[in-house]
Image (cartoon, grey):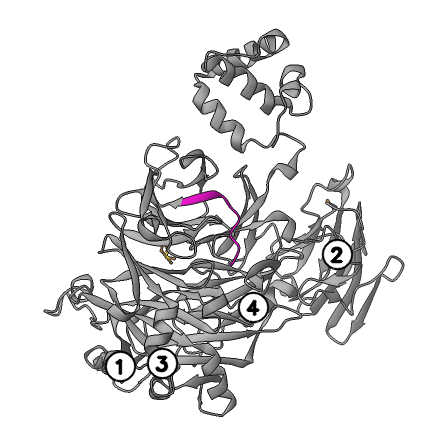
Amino acid sequence: MAVTRRELLTGGAAGAAGLIVGGVIGRAVGGGDGGGGAGLSGDVQQVADARGLTAEEVRKAVKSFVPPGKPDLDEFLLFSSGGHGGQILVIGVPSMRLYKVIGMFTPEPWQGFGYGADWGEAVLDEGTTEAGTPYSRARGKLTWADTHHPALSETNGEYDGRWVYINDRANGRLAMADLRDFKVKQIVDVPNLQSSHGGAFVTPNTEYVHISSMTPTLVKTENIDKALDNFKDAFRGYSSFLAVDQKTGRVDLSRSFQVELPPYTQDLADAGKLVSYGWAFINSYNAEMATGGNLEGKEPLEVGASQRDFDYLHVINWKKAEELVAAGRYTTKNGMKVIPLEVAAKEGVLYLVPEPRSPHGVDVAPNGEYICVSGKLDPHATVYSFTKLKEAIEKQDFEDKDVYGVPIVRYDAVVAARVELGAGPLHTQFDDKGYAYTSLFLESAVAKWSLGEPYFSGDQAFKLVEKLPIHYNIGHLVVMEGDTVKPAGKYLVALNKWSIDRFPVVGTLKPQNFQLVDLTGEKMEIIADMPITAAEPHYVQGIRIDRIKAWEVYPPGTNPLTMEPDPNAVKEGEERIERKGNTVEVWATVKRSNFKPDIIRAKKGDKVVIHLTNVETTPDATHGFAIPRYNINVSLDPGEATTVEFVADTQGAFAYYCTEFCSALHLEMQGWLLVS
Ligand code: CUK
Ligand code: CUA
């Protein structure tokens, strides 16, 4: 935001922001604008004094301030995991204002997701496999998830603003939202995964969205009581490459495949890009294959899993895996093509590289050359060179094989650097200038450090350059477009697990804290806090706002599930009710300020099918359709068509109504369902 001196003095285009800068800062540094500016800055000074704000605080506030009516001052959108709330949160940067909560796995009443509309019911049904498989719903429909890692779709390694994916850490699932309407379209219950962590990430052209198991999956179902004693054989991990339909963004399981993995606990994952295109990387911990058993005379899991000095970075050649699948070198497991572990180990699909002590994050630098790993128990970031890795693989420079016969690449042959950062390094992001930023969980800090060639060379490479204390206990962090081939830099957001003293006390469950960090100055600087109250967010991606081409209204009669014209959409004048046997079928229009028809008659036990079309074309003209006591609550955005289906099993007169205050006669926007 450029503010000229003239604007400051005249109170012109820059408005309040400019005045604050001119006033408070001017005075604080002892200069001041003099003349016309002095009077104006006096006002601002008074406000600041009255509120007990220092000049420094006001200067920072102005950096993220987005005044009323100037939404364009937000340059980026964050797509944040909503943690165990099962959603995605959409937040503006730098304003740090929450713009949307996208219900992904969890029903969302305002958006009418999961309360009777066919779109939401279809998505939730697809995400809950039938009982009877080892990965089925245990207790009815799954209506929550623990979302960790959002992945925006990419073209040539840059975000393209088409779709966003996110994993369900708890239940091994993946959901996709279309960024035309910001609504979930698909939940995939990924075969052979019970839980998931490695992903979601997309390959550079969104050929695949990747998700891997976290806790390995039980694969031998006989003698389950003894399964943990036989962990090595009874469990397996899976790296899933879910093929994306380029038209709809949906996962096509028939073109997808998995690579079977040893039952180490696979953790974070990332895709290779540019030089490392065609490869993928997954961290692991618990190469010890500890199972816990602290009441059965065994070590607790956290002790058993921290014995060895090294765990394994999994290196997967997914281009090679594609070839093997095409050649039929797979078995089919629960409907999924799986490259068996022995085949993956023998045919050059899977390699292991030692990585120090229980690592957590793995992040590939923008040029695809550096693979940065950091371990909770090791104060260093370990940087692997992809070029060296490829050479070592070609020369078969292996130090060993693991117990499953997977080649272990010689550690010293592939490490480019070990950079000492501080206590508890977790995740790394990158900017546009060759710097990496790593979160230090134990130290509550962000460490900024330099990458090697071609960004920095000699003693300037792989060097810690700055540390910024944050508040408190940082997990992930995000730099704008910081995991693409062309990071935008500019801002970093720290995703902090604890807020301690940063916010008013609102009970025993405290908000978590997103802190906005300005990267444009000499030093990193925290300029805003944002309380996060939906659940514990994990990863976030930040995309340039102009990459997103969202719709404001649907083309008339669009079904949000298909994004195509709904065959049962109606125009005004086509409203009708038909009865066939025990089915009452209704084609209704919805607009300011009525439902047509506004009386629906049914007999107890009838099946009632209501096709609703919002015939409005005005942005914002959303209507609701709720039937009390029937647990039906639909939201219809302008142009939207959807269907509600239920059995009229309770008799009475039910006043259905519009749940959105849509017009002066909104309160009159109601009708009767008579069940006799
Ligand atoms: S994990 Cu949460 S702080 Cu699931 Cu990405 Cu590291
Ligand atoms: Cu439509 Cu209120």
- Is 588 or 488 nearer to us in this picture? 488
Between marks 4 and 3, how big is the CA–CA gap?
27 Å
The kind of residue tagged 3 is: Glu
For label 4, the residue is 206
* In the image, the residue with mark 4 has its CB under 8 Å from the nearest atom of ligand 1: no
The kind of residue tagged 4 is: Thr
For label 3, the residue is 394
For label 2, the residue is 554
Whether tag 2 and tag 3 are in contact, CB under 8 A, the answer is: no
* Mark 3 residue element: helix
Is residue 492 inside the magenta stretch?
A: yes
For label 1, the residue is 224
Q: Which residues are magenta?
A: 485-494
Whether tag 3 and tag 1 are in contact, CB under 8 A, the answer is: no
Residue 139 badge? none
Question: Going from the N terminus, do you reach mark 2 or mark 1 first?
Answer: 1
The quadrant of the rendering that contains the N terminus is: top right
Q: Quadrant of ligand 2?
A: top right
Residue extending furthest toward the right: 573
Q: Residue 251, located in which quarter of the rendered image? A: bottom right
* Mark 1 residue element: helix
Give the mark toward the camera: 3 or 1: 3
Main SS, magenta region, reads strand
Whether tag 2 and tag 4 are in contact, CB under 8 A, the answer is: no
